Amino acid sequence: MEKNLIFPLSCELTVSNVFEEKINIVLYEGITTFIGPNGSGKTQTQKRLRDYLKSKYGNNHVRYLSSNRIGTMEQYRSKINQYNYSSADYQVGNRETKTHRHDIETSAGDFFTMDERKDVYIKIAERLSVLFKRQIFLRWDSGSLKVFFEKDDGRGEYSVVAEASGLINVISILAALYDEEILFLLIDEPEVSLHPQLQAFLLREMKAAVKEYGKTIVLSTHATDFISLNTIEDISHFVFFSENNLPRQVDSSIPEFKSKKLGDFIQRLGHSYKNGFFAKRILLIEGASDLVLCNYLSDRLGYNIDVSGTQIVPTDGKGQFPAAVKLFRTINKDVAILTDLDGFIDDNSIVELFAQSAKAKEIASKHAANSISDMVRNVKTKISGMIIKHIDDMREVYEKHPYWINKKEDDDETKTAKRAMVGMLFCVEDNEISKWQDAEEWKNTKIQIDTVISVLGELGCFVLKKGAIESYYHYVSNNTCVEKPSAAIEEVSNLDGVGFEKIKEYYSDIVTALEFVSTADEIDESLAVKKELLSELALVLGLVKYDKDEKAMYAAIKQAKNNADSLFEYQIIAEENKKGVEVNIKSNILQVTGFPFKIFVGDNVNAVVEDKIRNRMVTVGR
């Protein structure tokens, strides 16, 4: 079926048991979200929308997932009747059931998809392995499909019914997202059994599926983490339900939504503090501009900080840091801070939040210092001395920094000059510093500052050495220290075409903080693809050697792999009196490069595969 649907799609529905009148739901490209209280008609409307889309676009192109995705599995998870069930006996279904996988509203349909589609299975298996430290196995037993897991701790396999329901929900949704045959995916309450960070991870995967596979998604949710509202235009993607009223969907083009202030306000919406209560660790930042850039970099570079249990929390200024740190540490959360340069230069209140820990004392000893506080004090004394000495002859330099440009009339000029001069040390290259008076002393001072700030970073205290977040901008004016989320939005809007290494270079101090709070490893699908390829390639080359054709190859692979179709295409070739095959991959969704490639009889199979196949860096991988 042609995937180039024309949006918006207007869907006129009759939901007779809920609404007396016909209702119209408009689907926009991407994600449409139903919001409203229980009993307001969201689920019934979603089911009616499912039926409408199936009748219009075909049964196998529409998938509906109910909020109770474990279905009959519950009999094996809980005692719900008088019978005894062994978890090892649970079966997803038989081969006849598999043919209806797109109709099944529970995880069973998605396990059948993983069995049917090797590429979908690899995408799921790699995420389970990297992000959740689990392996998944699908096995046919006496004509029925069974599912097992194994944790990395080596304690052995266990049935799917013993796994956490939240993880099963994640697998179910991901499998439906990656199934390219599904054009419309409707999910009722995807947040079921998921903590906030996993909800954020799933939303990011949904956005990636929309972008990469052209999927249209309809959510019904009660979770704030599935409410993705970034611009005024996004308001059209929400359908608001309330009891005893028809659903309301707002057209974002109305005059009331032309206000720039409203756009900035939408950027500030969120429940970061509350979500932080569910997190393992907190990254405190100063404001909305920092949040815009941090969220973009985290998503773009694939740090998976949500999966690792981290919540980024804006505090509306560094003055709130001490109270926020005390709050989160009181409830046993690890806390890191990303502060502007003035949070380091002006006083020690932020540094002291980290300077007294046992780790701080250990690090200080390695640097031949009594304490981190002493290290900070010494470098600040050095800075003050340099500013007093050069406050006049370096005026042309520090007056170019936003700290000076935006100073107020009653600001202390020496303090402002100190902030601005240190910021300029990290805004210019060393060859420029070489032109300054006392250049070597300034370079030495820069090294000392950088060393101390790096030490603080080991403790979780990160300093924006160039100044404020705006000092890192490359595409909008950085001559401001005033919080302007709209400028941050404009900055990130220019980054989609910029390479990963350049992004890391431009925003190195922010990236360092994000790497610190992210504990999730890189997702590399190429490893699983290589393993799959190596299981076939020696057999294929052996058949080529004896002049077998492609049909014989596929038959041999199917026999060797218990009736499983190959993920790869093989074409017999001959070059310079050498026999071989050209290998391509059938999947469009696996994030690997190197296909197609040629390999010949006598080649080192392991070496060729290792040399050719590489991970393709995308949203989920750094």
Image: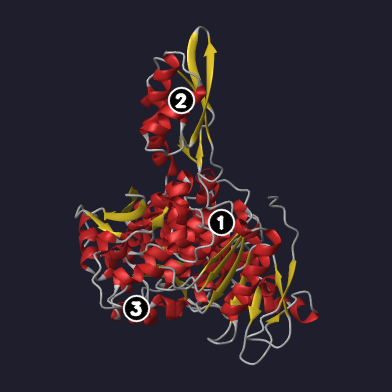
Who comes first in sequence, dot 1 or dot 2?
Answer: 1
Q: Position of residue 247 (x, y in %)?
A: 67, 83
Q: Is residue 321 above or below residue 306?
A: below
Image position of 183 (left or right of 74): right
Residue highlighted by disc 3:
328
Of mark 3 and mark 1, the one earlier in the sequence is 1
Q: Look at label 1 and name its amino acid.
A: Ala
Element on which disc 1 rests: helix
Asked whether disc 3 touches disc 2, contact meaning CB atoms under 8 Å apart, the reply is: no
Residues at marks 3 and 1 touching, judged by CB atoms closer than 8 Å? no
Residue lying at 74% horizontally and 65% vertically, measured from the top left: 8
Residue at image position (23%, 63%) is: 359
- The residue under the point 42% across, 33% down is 558
- The label nearer to you, 3 versus 1, is 1
Q: Which mark is residue 208?
A: 1
Q: Which mark is residue 553?
A: 2
SS class, disc 3: helix
Q: Is residue 362 left or right of 469 when viewed as pictured?
A: left
Rendered view: 597 above or below 228:
above
Residue 21 at x, y percent in the picture: 73, 86
Res 230 visible: no
Spatial separation of the CA atoms under disc 3 and disc 2: 60 Å
